Image (spheres, grey):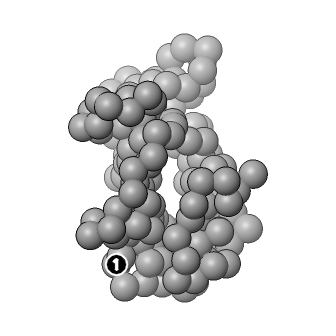
Protein backbone atom coordinates (compact mmCIF):
# COMPACT_ATOMS: atom_id res chain seq x y z
CA UNK A 1 0.00 0.00 0.00
CA UNK A 2 1.32 3.41 -0.95
CA UNK A 3 0.46 6.88 0.29
CA UNK A 4 -1.38 8.79 -2.45
CA UNK A 5 0.45 12.09 -1.90
CA UNK A 6 3.87 10.44 -2.10
CA UNK A 7 2.86 8.70 -5.32
CA UNK A 8 1.57 11.92 -6.92
CA UNK A 9 4.76 13.74 -5.88
CA UNK A 10 6.73 10.97 -7.62
CA UNK A 11 4.66 11.47 -10.79
CA UNK A 12 5.51 15.18 -10.84
CA UNK A 13 9.19 14.51 -10.10
CA UNK A 14 9.53 11.93 -12.90
CA UNK A 15 8.10 14.35 -15.49
CA UNK A 16 10.06 17.37 -14.29
CA UNK A 17 13.42 15.70 -13.69
CA UNK A 18 13.75 13.60 -16.87
CA UNK A 19 16.81 13.72 -19.11
CA UNK A 20 15.04 16.58 -20.89
CA UNK A 21 13.86 18.52 -17.86
CA UNK A 22 10.47 20.16 -17.97
CA UNK A 23 8.80 22.77 -15.85
CA UNK A 24 5.33 22.88 -14.39
CA UNK A 25 3.29 25.19 -16.64
CA UNK A 26 0.32 25.52 -14.27
CA UNK A 27 -0.23 24.51 -10.68
CA UNK A 28 -1.09 20.79 -10.57
CA UNK A 29 -4.67 19.99 -9.64
CA UNK A 30 -4.67 17.30 -6.99
CA UNK A 31 -7.73 15.44 -5.86
CA UNK A 32 -7.89 13.15 -2.86
CA UNK A 33 -10.87 10.93 -2.13
CA UNK A 34 -9.20 9.28 0.86
CA UNK A 35 -5.58 8.56 1.73
CA UNK A 36 -5.22 6.11 -1.18
CA UNK A 37 -7.58 7.20 -3.97
CA UNK A 38 -7.21 10.37 -5.97
CA UNK A 39 -5.78 11.97 -9.03
CA UNK A 40 -3.67 14.62 -10.64
CA UNK A 41 -4.00 16.94 -13.60
CA UNK A 42 -0.60 18.27 -14.62
CA UNK A 43 0.83 20.34 -17.48
CA UNK A 44 4.59 20.19 -18.14
CA UNK A 45 6.29 22.54 -20.62
CA UNK A 46 9.65 21.61 -22.17
CA UNK A 47 12.44 23.90 -23.45
CA UNK A 48 11.35 23.49 -27.09
CA UNK A 49 7.83 24.74 -26.29
CA UNK A 50 6.25 21.29 -26.37
CA UNK A 51 3.73 20.39 -23.67
CA UNK A 52 2.70 17.21 -21.88
CA UNK A 53 -0.84 17.20 -20.49
CA UNK A 54 -1.34 14.51 -17.85
CA UNK A 55 -4.51 13.27 -16.22
CA UNK A 56 -4.13 10.36 -13.87
CA UNK A 57 -6.60 8.77 -11.46
CA UNK A 58 -4.74 6.44 -9.09
CA UNK A 59 -5.70 3.81 -6.54
CA UNK A 60 -2.81 3.25 -4.12
CA UNK A 61 -4.72 0.99 -1.70
CA UNK A 62 -3.38 -2.33 -2.99
CA UNK A 63 0.05 -3.87 -3.39
CA UNK A 64 0.47 -2.05 -6.73
CA UNK A 65 -0.79 1.34 -7.88
CA UNK A 66 -3.73 0.96 -10.28
CA UNK A 67 -4.65 3.66 -12.79
CA UNK A 68 -8.43 3.81 -13.06
CA UNK A 69 -8.24 6.48 -15.78
CA UNK A 70 -5.27 8.06 -17.50
CA UNK A 71 -4.28 10.26 -20.40
CA UNK A 72 -0.80 11.43 -21.38
CA UNK A 73 -1.20 13.88 -24.26
CA UNK A 74 1.97 15.35 -25.78
CA UNK A 75 1.96 18.14 -28.34
CA UNK A 76 4.64 20.20 -30.03
CA UNK A 77 5.11 23.98 -29.75
CA UNK A 78 2.53 24.50 -32.54
CA UNK A 79 -0.06 22.48 -30.55
CA UNK A 80 0.08 19.51 -32.97
CA UNK A 81 -0.48 16.19 -31.26
CA UNK A 82 2.60 13.98 -31.29
CA UNK A 83 1.18 11.16 -29.15
CA UNK A 84 -1.45 10.33 -26.58
CA UNK A 85 -1.74 7.31 -24.33
CA UNK A 86 -5.15 6.78 -22.76
CA UNK A 87 -7.65 4.22 -21.62
CA UNK A 88 -10.86 5.83 -22.86
CA UNK A 89 -13.12 2.93 -23.90
CA UNK A 90 -13.59 3.95 -27.54
CA UNK A 91 -11.55 1.32 -29.41
CA UNK A 92 -12.95 -2.10 -28.42
CA UNK A 93 -11.39 -3.69 -31.54
CA UNK A 94 -7.88 -3.40 -30.07
CA UNK A 95 -6.40 -6.37 -28.18
CA UNK A 96 -5.26 -4.07 -25.35
CA UNK A 97 -8.71 -2.49 -24.94
CA UNK A 98 -9.24 -0.06 -23.33
CA UNK A 99 -5.52 0.85 -23.31
CA UNK A 100 -4.16 2.33 -26.55
CA UNK A 101 -1.92 4.95 -28.11
CA UNK A 102 -2.63 7.66 -30.68
CA UNK A 103 0.31 8.94 -32.78
CA UNK A 104 0.23 12.09 -34.88
CA UNK A 105 -2.26 14.86 -35.46
CA UNK A 106 -5.98 14.08 -35.74
CA UNK A 107 -5.93 14.40 -39.55
CA UNK A 108 -3.34 11.63 -39.96
CA UNK A 109 -3.58 9.89 -36.63
CA UNK A 110 -2.42 6.31 -36.26
CA UNK A 111 -3.77 4.07 -33.52
CA UNK A 112 -1.79 1.35 -31.75
CA UNK A 113 -2.66 -1.26 -29.14
CA UNK A 114 -0.47 -0.25 -26.24
CA UNK A 115 -0.54 0.18 -22.54
CA UNK A 116 -0.83 1.10 -20.02
CA UNK A 117 2.55 2.79 -20.40
CA UNK A 118 4.92 3.38 -17.52
CA UNK A 119 5.68 6.95 -16.49
CA UNK A 120 9.26 6.45 -17.61
CA UNK A 121 8.07 5.25 -21.04
CA UNK A 122 6.06 8.46 -21.43
CA UNK A 123 9.16 10.50 -20.49
CA UNK A 124 11.33 8.51 -22.92
CA UNK A 125 8.86 9.20 -25.73
CA UNK A 126 8.80 12.93 -24.93
CA UNK A 127 12.61 12.89 -24.96
CA UNK A 128 12.61 11.04 -28.32
CA UNK A 129 10.33 13.67 -29.88
CA UNK A 130 12.46 16.54 -28.54
CA UNK A 131 15.59 14.88 -29.96
CA UNK A 132 13.82 14.21 -33.29
CA UNK A 133 11.88 17.40 -34.10
CA UNK A 134 9.37 17.06 -36.89
CA UNK A 135 9.42 13.26 -36.85
CA UNK A 136 6.70 10.99 -35.49
CA UNK A 137 7.45 7.99 -33.38
CA UNK A 138 7.02 4.54 -34.97
CA UNK A 139 6.72 1.24 -33.09
CA UNK A 140 10.13 -0.22 -32.39
CA UNK A 141 11.87 3.18 -32.27
CA UNK A 142 12.35 2.98 -28.48
CA UNK A 143 13.75 -0.03 -26.68
On the question of residue 42 being in view, the answer is no
Q: Residue at x 52, y 70 (%)?
A: 136
Image position, residue 18 (x, y; %): 69, 63
Q: Is residue 82 above or below residue 133?
A: above
Front residue (pair 18, 88): 88
Q: Which residue is mark 1?
A: 79
Residue 83 figure quarter: bottom left
The residue positioned farthest toward the top in the image shown: 62
Q: Secondary structure at mark 1?
A: loop
Q: Is residue 26 above or below residue 63?
A: below
Image position, residue 91 (x, y; %): 29, 37
Residue 62 figure quarter: top right
Q: Quadrant of the N terminus?
A: top right
On the question of residue 82 being in view, the answer is yes
In the displayed structure, does residue 140 sit left or right of residue 9?
A: right
Q: Is residue 143 above or below residue 129?
A: above
Q: Residue at x 33, y 68 (%)?
A: 108
How dense is the environment of label 1, judged by Cα within 10 Å: few (below 14), some, or many (20 and up)? Answer: few
Residue 80 figure quarter: bottom left
Front residue (pair 7, 74): 74
How many marks are shown on the rendered structure? Answer: 1
Q: Residue at x 37, y 85 (%)?
A: 78
Front residue (pair 84, 24): 84
Q: Residue at x 29, y 30 (%)?
A: 92
Q: Is residue 131 above or below residue 13?
A: below
Image position, residue 99 (x, y; %): 42, 35
In the displayed structure, does residue 38 sit left or right of residue 106?
A: right
Amino acid sequence: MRDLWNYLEDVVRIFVEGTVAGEIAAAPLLEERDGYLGGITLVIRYHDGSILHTFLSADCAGEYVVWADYSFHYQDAEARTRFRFDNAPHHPELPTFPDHMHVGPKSGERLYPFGPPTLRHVVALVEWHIANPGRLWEPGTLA
